[in-house]
């Protein structure tokens, strides 16, 4: 889908069907026909469009001889999960800055653009518009981190009550989200620092302050992600150790029961052999004696095992 916008006299952002008067073109999941029409109307390289739509593309800045510049930066996207858990991956958003127009391209819708339509933003200042988008992308990371931390606390409370596979799956999904975040945030940070040297991004004094805000907001997101990732990794290791201890306890209990059940079998097996035993002739009490021997052995073994566990 391709939507064109421009400012009216009150600086409100309004939709227009005339691309020649458009100041901002927003491209979301374009069809092949829409992509071809966009490339025919605007003389930027085809690679700019393809790279912005590539979900595996890394954050970077690229300039072209035609006068267009491409800024690719990642933003968080909420995953569709059939379980009741909030987890994220990241998706690139391309910002193409050209003469008189700015083009945003992404394969996933970015919520900020919907809110932007209700604000008064002067689209003539392309650099300020691009920096505002980058700032909102960094802020979106911080908002997503707050939600993930809330999910982590809820999962932790449930795991303290009972460790289940589903709850451990929730924890792993949160950890994967944070891994995606830290990878994207670090490449984004490198891209943002290069904006100081981008010749096509003409900045005023207010824009320099906004760029500083972008860097600060992004650095906050990086530090928060690193902290949350260490916490989740610590939780994962702790619950892995807990499960290992529970498994060892279970195996120990099963081993004890196996030993105790083996002792009567061992005693009774003597009487299944064709070998004369002293109590064979006393048929009246032979079974009582055998059972008594078995019970005594089981009792003695139980006492020894219990005493051994206490010494541990």
Image (tube, rainbow, N blue to C red):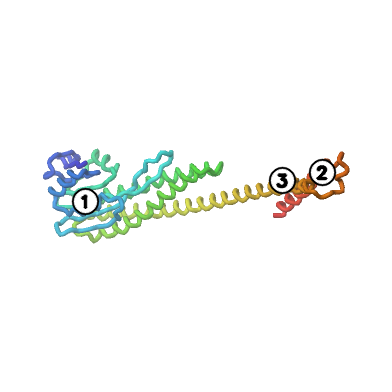
Give whichever of discs 3 and 1 has the lower sequence position: 1
Is 200 situated left or right of 85 in this image?
Answer: left
- Inspect this view and state whether residue 202 appears: no
- Inspect this view and state whether residue 89 appears: yes
- Please identify the quadrant where the C terminus is shown: bottom right
- Residue at image mark 2: 292
How many angstroms separate mark 3 from mark 2 (CA)? Answer: 15 Å
| Image location of residue 296, percent across then percent down | 80, 46
The quarter of the picture where residue 22 lies is top left
Graded by Cα atoms within 10 Å as few (under 14), some (14 to 19) or many (20 or more), the crowding at tag 2 reads few
Please name the residue shown 25% across and 41% down the image: 116
Between 298 and 188, the one nearer to me in the picture? 298
Give whichever of discs 3 and 2 has the lower sequence position: 3
How many angstroms separate mark 3 from mark 1 (CA)? Answer: 72 Å
Considering every residue shown, the one lying at the far front of the view is 274
Please name the residue shown 82% across and 43% down the image: 292
- Residue at image mark 3: 261
Residue 261's place in the image compared with 200, above or below, is: above
Please name the residue shown 40% across and 47% down the image: 145
Query: Regarding mark 1 in the picture, which secondary structure is present there?
Result: helix
- Residue at image mark 1: 49
Please name the residue shown 29% across and 42% down the image: 111
Whether pointer 1 and pointer 2 mark residues with C-beta atoms closer than 8 Å, the reply is no
Is 160 situated left or right of 8 in this image?
Answer: right
Graded by Cα atoms within 10 Å as few (under 14), some (14 to 19) or many (20 or more), the crowding at tag 3 reads few
């Amino acid at each position: 889908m391709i939507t064109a916008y421009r400012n009216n006299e009150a600086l409100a952002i309004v939709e227009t069907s005339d691309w020649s008067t458009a100041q901002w073109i927003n491209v979301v999941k374009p069809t092949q026909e829409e992509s071809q029409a966009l490339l025919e109307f605007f003389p930027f390289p085809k690679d700019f469009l393809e790279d912005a739509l590539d979900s595996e593309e890394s954050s970077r800045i690229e300039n072209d001889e035609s006068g267009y510049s491409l800024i690719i930066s990642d933003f968080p996207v909420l995953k569709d999960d059939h379980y009741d858990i909030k987890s994220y991956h990241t998706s690139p958003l391309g910002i193409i800055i050209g003469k008189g127009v700015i083009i945003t391209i992404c394969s996933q819708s970015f919520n900020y653009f919907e809110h932007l339509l209700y604000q008064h933003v002067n689209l003539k200042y392309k650099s300020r518009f691009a920096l505002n988008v980058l700032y909102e992308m960094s802020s979106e990371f911080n908002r997503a981190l707050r939600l993930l931390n809330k999910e982590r606390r809820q999962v932790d409370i449930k795991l303290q009550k009972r460790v289940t596979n589903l709850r451990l799956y929730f924890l792993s999904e949160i950890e994967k989200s944070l891994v995606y975040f830290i990878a994207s945030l670090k490449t984004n940070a490198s891209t943002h620092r290069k904006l100081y040297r981008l010749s096509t991004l003409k900045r005023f004094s207010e824009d320099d302050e906004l760029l500083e805000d972008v860097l600060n907001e992004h650095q906050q997101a990086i530090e928060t992600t690193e902290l949350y990732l260490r916490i989740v990794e610590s939780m994962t290791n702790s619950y892995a150790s807990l499960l290992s201890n529970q498994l060892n306890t279970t195996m120990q209990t099963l081993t004890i029961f196996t030993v105790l059940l083996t002792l009567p079998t061992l005693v009774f097996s003597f009487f299944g052999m064709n070998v004369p035993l002293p109590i064979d002739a006393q048929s009246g009490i032979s079974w009582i004696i055998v059972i008594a021997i078995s019970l005594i052995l089981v009792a003695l073994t139980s006492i020894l095992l219990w005493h051994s566990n206490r010494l541990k």
